[in-house]
Image (tube, rainbow, N blue to C red):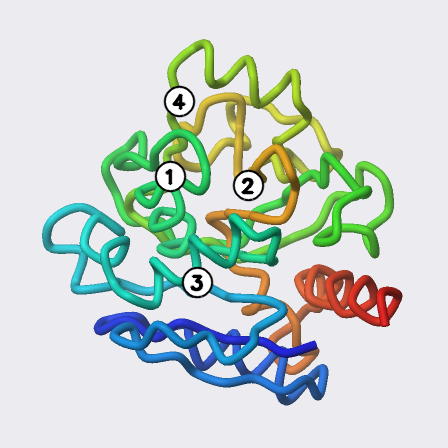
Amino acid sequence: MNVSVIVFPGANCDRDAAYVTRDLLGQPTQMIWHEDRDLQQADVVIVPGGFSYGDYLRCGAIARFSPALQATVEHAQRGGLVIGICNGFQILTEAGLLPGALMRNRDLHFICDRVPLRVERTDLVWTQNYADQAVITVPIAHGEGCYYADADTLQALEDNGQVVFRYCDVTGDPTPASNPNGSLNNIAGICNQQGNVLGMMPHPERVSDPLLGGTDGLALFESVLSKQLQTI
């Protein structure tokens, strides 16, 4: 599985993502500078978290215009796999690869915590290694993670089964109290209709190594690797 991680000025989670695919899973992984268009024959493109361009305008609003991201859009349109994590999720919505937008958190505070998520689908390349309706614990760290979409878009997401992860309590119930940022329908992650593009605010790369206290995020990366090996 050939993995390319986009590197934006100000991003701070690109090395974390590369550590998982390169060091934990042993897959060829290269860092792609944002000014480059060559994704180096990537099977999977990771748009990492962090603060691309300092988030001085609007999260992801500048990054979407980078040559590397434009190449990522073309990669996705050809059916290639793309995952955006935290700021990467924001960038994918700004680029139009995923619907909706990420707004300031409900309480207007930056949140750094570990939260339960319910895995809503296990038939995707990203989630096939999770148990159905599994409750996993994944870190969050964001100030603008409140997912918003207009009523029609939100209904379409639900009708099409595009909600992949939902904030919930430890029993798997998506209660208002378990929603850390006010996201509509407790949405923590969505995919496009084809399922090849995934965006999520929580950080699976931060919970993929036992040394960090958990491995609930590793199954996501292992799912992709398993699927890629099945196609060889």
Q: Secondary structure at mark 1?
A: loop
In the rendered view, tell whether residue 98 sits above or below residue 174.
below
The image shows residue 224 at horizontal and vertical percentages of 73, 63
Mark 2 or mark 3: whose residue is earlier in sequence: 3
Q: Nearer the viewer, residue 125 or 215?
A: 125
Q: Which residue is mark 4?
A: 149
Mark 4 or mark 2: whose residue is earlier in sequence: 4
Q: Is residue 63 left or right of residue 220?
A: left
Q: Estimate the spatial distance between the alpha carbons at disc 4 and disc 2, rounded to whole Å.
A: 13 Å
Q: Estimate the spatial distance between the alpha carbons at disc 2 and disc 1, rounded to whole Å.
A: 15 Å
Q: Which residue is mark 3?
A: 47
Q: Estimate the spatial distance between the alpha carbons at disc 1 and disc 4, rounded to whole Å.
A: 13 Å
Mark 1 or mark 3: whose residue is earlier in sequence: 3
Q: Nearer the viewer, mark 1 or mark 4?
A: 1
Q: Which residue is mark 2?
A: 189
Mark 2 or mark 1: whose residue is earlier in sequence: 1
Q: Is residue 59 left or right of residue 90?
A: left
Amino acid type, callout 4: Ala
Q: Which residue is mark 1?
A: 96
Question: If the image is split into quadrants, where does the N terminus sit?
Answer: bottom right
Q: Nearer the viewer, residue 93 or 201?
A: 93
The image shows residue 74 at horizontal and vertical percentages of 45, 55
Q: Nearer the viewer, residue 32 or 133?
A: 32
Tell me whether circle 2 and circle 3 mark residues in contact (CB < 8 Å).
no
Amino acid type, callout 3: Val
